Amino acid sequence: MSVRLIDSLVTTEPLAELFSDRSVLRAMLEFEVALARAQVSLGMVPPSAAEAIAAAARVENFAVADLSRRAGRAGTLTIPLVEMLREQVRQESPLAADFVHFGATSQDVADTALVLLLKRAQPILENDLRRVEEALVHRIEEHRHTVMLGRTLLQAAPPVTFGLKAAGWLAAVRRSQRRLTSSFLEALVVQFGGASGTLAALGDQGLAVAKTLAGELNLTLPEAPWHSQRDRLAALVSACAILTGSLGKMARDISLLMQTEVAEVAEPGGEGRGGSSTMPHKHNPVGCILTLAAAHRMPGLVASFLSGMLQEHERAAGGWQAEWPTVADVLQGTGVAAASMAEVVEGLTVDATRMRSNIRATHGLIFAEKAMMLLSRKIGRKEAKKILDQAVRGSALAQRSLSDVLAEIPEVTRHLDGEALRTLDSPEDYLGATQSLIRGLLAAERSGKKEG
Amino acid sequence: MSVRLIDSLVTTEPLAELFSDRSVLRAMLEFEVALARAQVSLGMVPPSAAEAIAAAARVENFAVADLSRRAGRAGTLTIPLVEMLREQVRQESPLAADFVHFGATSQDVADTALVLLLKRAQPILENDLRRVEEALVHRIEEHRHTVMLGRTLLQAAPPVTFGLKAAGWLAAVRRSQRRLTSSFLEALVVQFGGASGTLAALGDQGLAVAKTLAGELNLTLPEAPWHSQRDRLAALVSACAILTGSLGKMARDISLLMQTEVAEVAEPGGEGRGGSSTMPHKHNPVGCILTLAAAHRMPGLVASFLSGMLQEHERAAGGWQAEWPTVADVLQGTGVAAASMAEVVEGLTVDATRMRSNIRATHGLIFAEKAMMLLSRKIGRKEAKKILDQAVRGSALAQRSLSDVLAEIPEVTRHLDGEALRTLDSPEDYLGATQSLIRGLLAAERSGKKEG
Amino acid sequence: MSVRLIDSLVTTEPLAELFSDRSVLRAMLEFEVALARAQVSLGMVPPSAAEAIAAAARVENFAVADLSRRAGRAGTLTIPLVEMLREQVRQESPLAADFVHFGATSQDVADTALVLLLKRAQPILENDLRRVEEALVHRIEEHRHTVMLGRTLLQAAPPVTFGLKAAGWLAAVRRSQRRLTSSFLEALVVQFGGASGTLAALGDQGLAVAKTLAGELNLTLPEAPWHSQRDRLAALVSACAILTGSLGKMARDISLLMQTEVAEVAEPGGEGRGGSSTMPHKHNPVGCILTLAAAHRMPGLVASFLSGMLQEHERAAGGWQAEWPTVADVLQGTGVAAASMAEVVEGLTVDATRMRSNIRATHGLIFAEKAMMLLSRKIGRKEAKKILDQAVRGSALAQRSLSDVLAEIPEVTRHLDGEALRTLDSPEDYLGATQSLIRGLLAAERSGKKEG
Amino acid sequence: MSVRLIDSLVTTEPLAELFSDRSVLRAMLEFEVALARAQVSLGMVPPSAAEAIAAAARVENFAVADLSRRAGRAGTLTIPLVEMLREQVRQESPLAADFVHFGATSQDVADTALVLLLKRAQPILENDLRRVEEALVHRIEEHRHTVMLGRTLLQAAPPVTFGLKAAGWLAAVRRSQRRLTSSFLEALVVQFGGASGTLAALGDQGLAVAKTLAGELNLTLPEAPWHSQRDRLAALVSACAILTGSLGKMARDISLLMQTEVAEVAEPGGEGRGGSSTMPHKHNPVGCILTLAAAHRMPGLVASFLSGMLQEHERAAGGWQAEWPTVADVLQGTGVAAASMAEVVEGLTVDATRMRSNIRATHGLIFAEKAMMLLSRKIGRKEAKKILDQAVRGSALAQRSLSDVLAEIPEVTRHLDGEALRTLDSPEDYLGATQSLIRGLLAAERSGKKEG
């Protein structure tokens, strides 16, 4: 199973594999096998029947093309799957065939299979997120003091350090990951309700089967089936999108910093990465682009999922059937963002020299706020603003540094001494709480507790 | 190539095939072959080179797994594809290899390939839409006079006919289809701009190549490349979603009419259709469900596409790369809705008797408006309302027909004669402009002109 | 301040008031006053200046029309607000004017004001949600044993009880509310970062001011400013949408149950509720409709918010500026859903007789699954299915009860005794785990702990 | 009526006014007056009654707070409005009161009022779009030959001209506007159907009234009422979003070009525009930001509208009621984008010198593609690529121009003469079809015909 060409920019190999035919089929068959085993252990089904079911429930025994065609007719994948499985089992043991899918409904299989796939997706995502976090921690420590332009509304602003910027990314990713972990915990629950969600077909043994089944599958047993209450999945899907948003913000920042005219950081290149089909000089921000692509798709995918939540009665007509591909796309999009940013951050080149020269290229204009604060204290805000506005214009016009221009204005030199003017455009001297903030951001979430 | 299991409810076989690896690959290779041929015809490339390229550009020559993996590294499918193609060609003719992808950029291939796929999707959709329309016309003619409850806010309202209801569906589908046709017309344009959209690599022959290329591919040549102007695709995607919305409204109506308690219409059953894995008595509205599922996904998919429109400069970082799977999902969703509703409408069973008995079950309360109009004319609206409110309550409480209750009220019989009361709850006598509206709806759009 | 006509179906009075001009303005002014006071307590600002600022910071002093016009010019409401405030203060004390907005940036005011509004929204929402929950608990206890049709894919299915259905609603609302509470906890944090988020203008006192400011406003101090990390708000907005989805599912169920043909429950009427402008007999599901309207808008609003998350550097160009109306709409939509469903559930009429008669009207077909289970045990599944399929068809055609039809089939009576056939279509005898599930659902979340 | 503070960045004054209480109320009252007049002209209503209705139907006569509160109770604004109007009329003429809202239903009023508002929105939008187009045409003519960097994936690419870039913007806006015009044409239709859409209450005069009513209101009469077929509005809403997307793409480009490090263009400043509350040096891209904010909200708003399309039967429960604020937000968002970009483009400063120096700063690397084309012809692609890769690295490392580096490589000078190397990095010599493309883009759509 390889990644489909149409999906080649929106998934990763392990996640494409996870939602492949084999994997989907395997998850559904696991349900049927676990159900039979649970019923054996409760004395409802003969052990030999469960063995026959387990023997037949092998992916190789099922013709996928036939399955998907019949699923489209039936409105659910479970019906043809169960029919085929029963047929397989019957060839070995007509008795066992009667115990296939015993007391379950289509949705039990489909939903639980989806949950099993989600459970397998979790460590894949977490592994890449751990890489992102670890690499960010290194970058932060390394560049704690590396000054660079702050940028607000895409315009130069007073300086920050690259460490602070990266610490903001880190804390956001950690918060988003904590929410995702908590959503996984909530969503990894078995679905088992039978036709109407009462397990009536199993008489008074329904809950016992449900409990044993959950144990077999290593899933949590929820307080009741959730066939038309989809809030847990909705929360998971939203958490994925928010995490992808946090990764996407990082990708946007990095791709902007990689612009030819800015050139402060660079993604790692490496085999097949970042070239162009026509332009030999190009070094494209491919990891960021894949992340941004995922982040662009995500809000709409969440909307698709949420708009299916209004599910009718005990099983929805439409809202439920729309879920699978949306959930699969959301997980894969989150995965490609996490994997891409892991690679980006691990190999990121940071050009501290260029960062400083980009600050210098503003001629100190970004320190106008600082000059304003200093001068206001002496001559009042109104007067200070008048002088600054003029000095800023003068500096911009003449391409001279703001401190030089200010040093020629008597109202300024009367109040600010040479030292104040000399250090005016030193970025290191205008970083405020930067170091404390970095410490705070690094510490946050590390213990797994939220800030509330 | 079969439909993937995860997609089994959200596509059709022909459309899944259209977006399959083979089909995507073929469309990209068609571009490269057409480009070489166009350049041959302009004397820029030796004929033998084009032949060598055409010979190598066979789907079988490409390892899809390798392609998609390298696409994920490169951030575009084109780069590895061109590299592989060039390698293939080089084995036959080193000279010809130099003319592979000559003067084109990655996006030219990817966008034009997408357009070629869209062009092939159009007749598939149109064919099913034609079936929907033809079947609806039959239903309308058949049930022009078949009275049924009007239903507003899910409550019984004065009667309509099934023909009128179906005529509303038809006209909406026709309007939506007209918009889709016009969007296809606009969107089926070649993309060819080279690195920055100026075709500079081709010197002064860029536009000539573009024109010939468009001719080779049987696509329209737009006034300029559209590498970061995606409005045409956005319009197509939106038109698909609106059409799916129109089909979805029909599906919602039919699924509501199929409720056990309403039972006025039924989808056709047929092999593998509409059964349940547990309940032998079920006759599920599977075609409507698949359509509703598509309609639930569509708004979010449109949002995903639109939110990628803000594309940076001459090629976007993220917005563009997110498009392919979204467009493919939109087309497939529209297709499954059209195919499903074609089957539903062609085989729809309409139970005119049940429709009438559902009207009767309201005890004539839905004619309270009519009684109100009649009585108001005689005794004024205020007085009439007072009487009607009381009569309605009486009728509901006693489960007696409204006309019977009214016939016992002297203020009523003083003003309304027996004939008026007898025909009060005759649905045929309270259909207003129904027949004219049906004629108008049937006539609308048929000529292909819009109503403006 | 009244609800705008254009919004009259999508908000409530208290929430419309919360996002009114006066309320928004007040929240922004609170920030400025609290900032001055915090700075007084740290000795940075003379007490008299804070007093002058507090005196001027009265809603009455500001011309809203002028403010909003200038905000549109400035790209932020804060700039004109601060200018006006400073002008006001200057009239009393030119010195104090220099301390207005001291060390803060526009976004600090706007974001913190939004957080203050959110903090006020929380108890409004929670109050209505508490009403929903309490009313549901009553309904569940009352109708624990009230049998009604299960309905899957809008078709009749084996029975449930109304208590079970309502318990499903309750547990979903509780889960959704827990998530919302946790999102509020996370989101109610002060924003204070100054121009680039480093608080540089305040020298080494930035964090002390931040901490004191948070205390003044009774908000949590986060580990750092979050000017371009919007995940906390995203999580809140998503939690609102999911909660509205849970309420919307309840509204969909109730509106379907209120259909004329089903008529199992009814919303309370009351003054001005549920009538029609033309049809005196109508009793419309207005509360459900308002909830469904909110639920229809929500997924798109979430998408709008999420698609603004990719915020550039230290302050976004576009993504941030789009947030306010979206957040306001989301909160108001959630509020109208909660208030509407509180009213609906508190006054809901449940017609147990009609529920039973709707079951009876299926002629026992919904018990075919049960018959199947019973018969399979005796004669095998395949044989049982053949008999049942035939019996179901016979029952439907002849409009006779399934048990009567079965009682005439020798293969059946040979294996099932009279008692089994007599109780076959007794809904009470086919409820499976219903009562245990109700207990579980009622117990879940009550303790405030999640099930993980 | 002023713009609400919460909306101050997402609307314009004329459009906020259009959706104000007074304006909404006026549009609804216009319907009622036009209806009475139409019925007078058909002899169904006495002229004096219509006069009494017209006299009472004045905005001043209605208490908005009361109206919106009662609307929230009734689930529609029409019910309380008609009750109040009838009460007003009754005070003058009890007889006339009976003819208020005669034969109409709530939705007729609400939908037609919305259409009337849309009709008034159209010239407001078109006026600003005309300004955008005219200003763009000037910019294009002025800067037809002004060379600047092409930029793909946010990296420097071969040159374009600013005229070409602006021509791409222009053509997209024109296409989007054409679609919008066509959607307006389609959507500006009267809604008039009575209770169930059959106009039954008006006997055989329903269609005559509908036709006269449409004439009174200067709206088109559609072939039938469209109470639950919302495709026309959906098409309008989508067209608005696509247009906003086209404007947003322009805004993104301009805001990127305005970055401090790029500095190639600048928005006009002017009174209250673009300053910062803290940083005197800032010149913010406010017009672009407002446009981008609108473009961020739009996809979600479209999704909200589309997800309401699945409207039940003859009047929807939820989908319809959600429409008003969404449509109003979409129109206002489109309006603020059009007005903002009109101002931006009209006053845009273009710095041709900076554009050229940004090209020069790439050391000619963007011409590597050109060198590649030239060299490949002589020594084959493979060999050429090897040389170029090396030269590009050398140029980047040494910060020397690519042509200088190439001039030192014997394999190069052997094949390329001095002239070829001298003009290699002249942007004017590598513009390909730029001028033809500009001509084509300027010509497209001007005639109002589409390219198909």
Image (cartoon, coloured by chain):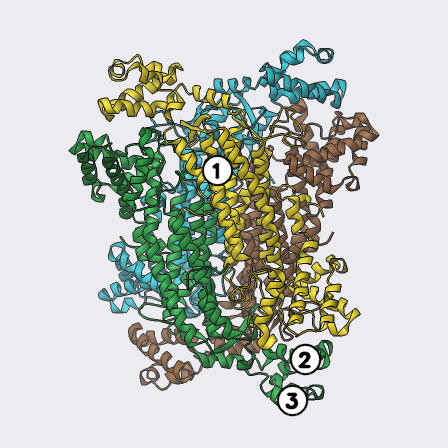
Chain colours: A yellow, B brown, C green, D cyan
Q: Earlier in the sequence, mark 2 or mark 3?
A: 2
In the image, which is nearer the foreground, mark 2 or mark 3?
A: 3
Q: Secondary structure at mark 3?
A: loop
Asked which quadrant contains residue A74, the reply is bottom right
Chain where mark 2 sits? C
Q: Is there one chain holding both mark 1 and mark 2? A: no
Q: Is D164 positioned to the left or the right of D54 in the image?
A: right
Under mark 3, the amino acid is Asp
Give the x, y percent position of residue A105: 62, 68
- Residue D354 % position (x, y): 48, 19
Inspect the image, locate mark 1, and give the three-letter code of the amino acid beneath it. Answer: Trp
The label number, if any, that marks residue C388 in the structure image: 2
> SS of the residue at dot 1?
helix
Residue density around tag 1, few if under 14, some if 14–19, many if 20 or more, within 10 Å: many
Q: Position of residue C285 (x, y in %)?
A: 41, 68
Give how far apart the Cα atoms at labels 1 and 2 are.
Answer: 62 Å
Q: Is residue B357 visible?
A: yes
Please, is residue A451 above or below residue C429 in the view?
Answer: above
Residue type at the position of mark 2: Leu
Residue B147, position as x, y percentages in the image: 53, 74
Q: Are marks 2 and 3 in contact (CB under 8 Å)?
A: no
Residue A72, quarter of the rendered image: bottom right
Which residue is label 1 attached to? A169
Residue lying furthest front in this view? A447
Q: Secondary structure at mark 2?
A: helix
Q: Residues within 10 Å of mark 2 (few under 14, many from 20)?
A: many
> What's the mark number on residue C417?
3
Against C264, residue D382 (above or below) is: above
Q: Residue furthest right?
A: B92
Disc 3 to disc 1, how far (Cα)? 71 Å
